Amino acid sequence: MEEREEVRRRPRASDRLVSAVPGPARNVVLEVGQMCQLLGKVIYSAVRYPRGYWKDTVDEMYSLLKLCFWPATLSMAGFGFLITVMGVGLLVLLGAANRIGGFWVMADIREIAAFMVGMVVAGVIGTSITSDLGARKAREELDALKVLGLDPIRMLVIPRVIATAVMCAMLNFLTSFVGVILGLIAVGALGDTTTGAYIDSMSHSLYSVDVWGAELKTLLIGLLIGIVCSFKGLNAGGGPEGVGRAVNQAVVICFALVWVFNFFFNSIVQGLNPDLLMLR
């Protein structure tokens, strides 16, 4: 018995690793680990028991589409138009106006579309998820669900995480289409070339890995947004003021994650597929 008590008192390897991290970074490491634990619980519960949450998931998907359709479209239209004007002007000066289609594949499908989707979903849906879960935590509704034998993660987190991930991928189709139309408009209004040259250049520069890579990237971005915002909402404390801080922290973390994840994902995909680096 004494040996068992001694074993229980010994710090675990994970605790020793966390204690070795400097003080300012320790809370960050703990939060990252807890977010990974939440992600594991969501995936395990959703795969092990794939029933009972699909109706709520469909409702969340419809709500996300209704709230994000116009913000995503208008954001892509405004930001994409700015990038289009700059790119067309540069290519015309270089005498490569017939390469506008290839340039827009790199700018729109690989970069801007996923970036705009992540920003819009994090700002609109991420804040909603965090504030709703945080308010439920402040009203002790989450504890009440546990007392009733219900799992808050399965009831409140899984539908929102799945809906956020799936709808991010679907919204990426929307923003990519808007970007292609903007390219056509720019070619007709500003570019010293034809729409046929634009389509030909785009068809030669667009690979299948661009399409499925963009969809996979936005799917994972939506998954990260759902997990981060759900974690911040479930762990909000300090009443209404604490909920407000949680919402602010969740949005800032999501914005930073979109930038970082987009950079590393594109670097890995382009490193594995060198043909993507060529402007045809």
Image: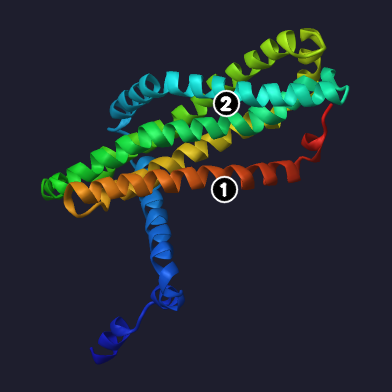
Quadrant housing residue 247: top left
177 left or right, relative to 104: left
170 left or right, relative to 268: left
Task: Give percent across and percent down for residue 218.
Answer: 53, 34
Q: Distance between the residues labelled 2 and 1?
A: 20 Å
Task: Give percent across and percent down for residue 49.
Answer: 33, 40
108 left or right, relative to 169: right
State whether residue 257 is above or below residue 119. below
Read off the residue under disc 1.
Answer: 260
Is any part of residue 28 visible from this angle?
yes
Quadrant housing residue 278: top right
For marks 2 and 1, the one nearer the N-term is 2
State whether residue 155 is above or below residue 91. below
Q: Within 10 angstroms of label 2, few (less than 14), some, or many (20 or more) residues? A: some
Taking the spot 75% from the left edge, 46% from the top edge, the residue there is 271
Tags 2 and 1 touching, CB below 8 Å? no
The amino acid sitting under disc 1 is Val
Taking the spot 43% from the left edge, 48% from the top edge, the residue there is 253
Query: Nearest the camera: 91 or 50?
Result: 91
The amino acid sitting under disc 2 is Phe
Taking the spot 73% from the left edge, 26% from the top edge, the residue there is 87
Is any part of residue 173 visible from this angle?
no
Q: Which mark is residue 79?
A: 2
SS label for mark 2: helix
Task: Give percent across and percent down for residue 258.
Answer: 52, 42
State whether residue 66 is above or below residue 270. above
